[in-house]
Amino acid sequence: MTTMAIEVEGLTKQYENIAAVKSASFSVPRGTICGFVGPNGAGKTTTIRMILGLISPSAGTGTVLGHSISHPERYLASVGAMIEGPAFYPALTGAENLKVLATMGGIEIERVDQLIDLVGLSGRGGDKYKTYSLGMKQRLGIAAALLPNPELLILDEPTNGLDPEGIQEVRDLLKKLASEGTTVFVSSHLLSEIEIISQHIVMLRKGEVVFAGAIDELLLNQKPTIIVRTENESDLAKVAAIATAQGHHVTIRHGEAHIEGPHEWAAVLNKLAFEAGIVLSQLTPTLPNLEETFFEMTGGQS
Amino acid sequence: MIQVFFAEWRKLRRPTLLLGTFAAALFFNGLITAFIYLMIDSPDGNGDRGRSIGREVLNLASGSVNGFASIGGLLGIIALCVFAAQSAQEYTYGTLRNLLVRQPRRLVLLLGKYGAMKSFALILTVVNAAVSIAISVYLSDRAKVSTDLWFTSEGWSAIGHTLVNVYISIVFYAIIGIALGIFLRSPISAISIALVWILILENLIGAVKPVTLDWMPGNQFAVIAQGGTPEVSYSHALTLGSSYVLVALLVSSYLFTKRDVAN
């Protein structure tokens, strides 16, 4: 048995004039939670669709649970997926929607009620899907993905529309599944969520993989940052100039200067700003986090 | 494939769809069958397009299913609408991606859908035949139509033949509906294009140049249901209709199995 749940090499999807995914290569180890992040339009959903056999790649190869992605029928019985949000028949009840999929996949119907309870929809399974709130639809989508008791669970933005309690529940559920050996491949725009639950990460930007590997490895390579706010926002550029002159890399984002540098340099910066007549309203040394790293690697800037 | 069949029936059996479809079919069935008997002496005719169906025709062994054969085309159009919507909605709701994750063999999925459609069409045919024959029997006295030959062996044979013909017609219409749904991926577009073509364009073109009706798909399917007409023979309608359906099957199967599912 291969140690990788997903392995893709040079995966490409070319539409007429646009390359949605460009030669993406990454692997997802079995039994881990792997985050899949990237800005809107980066190619995350297209990649997931190629992995699930819904879209044929223009080039490249891949395997899922040891089987080629050109034969999805060999592995999809062991894969659960929620792609681009939940999609169900509005006129059917939540339970009946799950029963359609269970019947289709030859899965025991008894599992439907268990999963409805598991995702917190007890008492609402008999209601029509069209009456569900966004959070309830999301929960039903997660239940549908869990139907085959999957070895590999692929979730596209699973916490969309969930309240904080629901997000915590999903987080706990994914951790529990991973601890039981399920591989979870989860895309999310909530980078803090990904950072909390994932051991591995795949970062996409404009269809290209900019990083794939362990989160620890990614953060280890990032430099500590000092976040600076000035009393007068127009002084922010002056602070940036001072830091740049001292050989530090600066990005200005959300009315803050993010200056790469060790924590102890914050005192030096404070002194230099004081001497330049600039009043600092915030001077915060921070350890690198996923969001900072993501913005840096994907070139995101406000 | 049997799993797909039963999964499809979970969708088809929902009350709004099942009762709505059967209510519409039975309403038109009752209306047209009753019209034949209640308007039997009307100088404006009592059949399709002002044709007169007299007692001499209704007294025959095939008299019991005359009304049913007349509504075969209409039942087919209802089936077309239902299955065009069913297949196109998989794209608009985005549910096709869920189905394909659970059944990645696309041809198996499509064949299962066709299987469910055929069983739905069979129930639609049998129920409507029973209701139409019952109405015919009920109104025969009032219209002074003799039912002596209706339930002889020849009469039962006519009922059987008409059932088969109407069933073939409904299935052909429904296959065209599924094909349009897959091709256009929009229920409104699929249904409106089909209805405009069958109910308006075919009749307009046929009125201007009647010979074209010999080649129109909708007309062939309606003729199959009626077991042939003086203008178009049954064998011609069956051969040509089958050809149209075969093309629709091939194109829709190719699109369904090869096209990316991106919505």
Image (spheres, coloured by chain):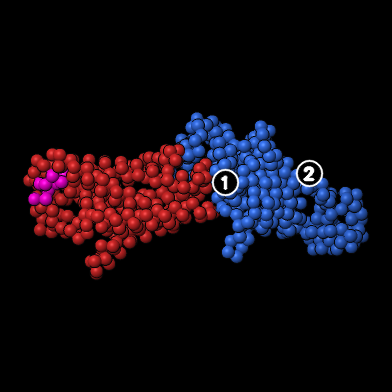
Chain colours: A blue, B red
Q: Which of B259 and A271 is in front in this view?
A: B259
Measured as percent of width and height from the top left, residue B32 is found at 20, 50
Q: Residue B93: where, in percent of width, then height?
A: 48, 49
* Chain at tag 1: A
Q: Identify the residue at horizontal 75%, vertical 57% (top origin).
A: A253
Q: Is residue B59 magenta?
A: yes
* Disc ID at residue A71: 1
> What residue is shown at x 15% (from left), y 39% (from top)?
B153
Q: Which of marks 2 and 1 is nearer the N terminus?
A: 1
Q: Main secondary structure of the magenta part?
A: helix
Point out the frontmost of discs 2 and 1: 1
- Image quadrant for the N terminus of chain B? top left
Amino acid bearing label 2: Asp
The three-letter code of the residue at mark 1 reads His
A171 over A263 or under it: above or below: above
Work out whether residue A191 or residue B195 is closer to the camera in this orientation and state it.
Answer: B195
Position of B21 with respect to A184 (left or right) is left
Q: Residues within 10 Å of mark 2 (few under 14, many from 20)?
A: some
Q: For residue A60, what is the image quadrant?
A: bottom right
Is residue B78 visible in the rendered structure shown here?
no
Query: Pointer 2: what residue?
Result: A216
Mark 2 vs mark 1, CA separation in Å: 34 Å
Q: Which span is picked out in magenta?
A: B56-64
Residue A211 vs residue B176: left or right? right
Q: Where is residue A161 in the image (x, y as percent from the top left)?
A: 59, 45
The percent coordinates of residue A254 (x first, y second) are 74, 57
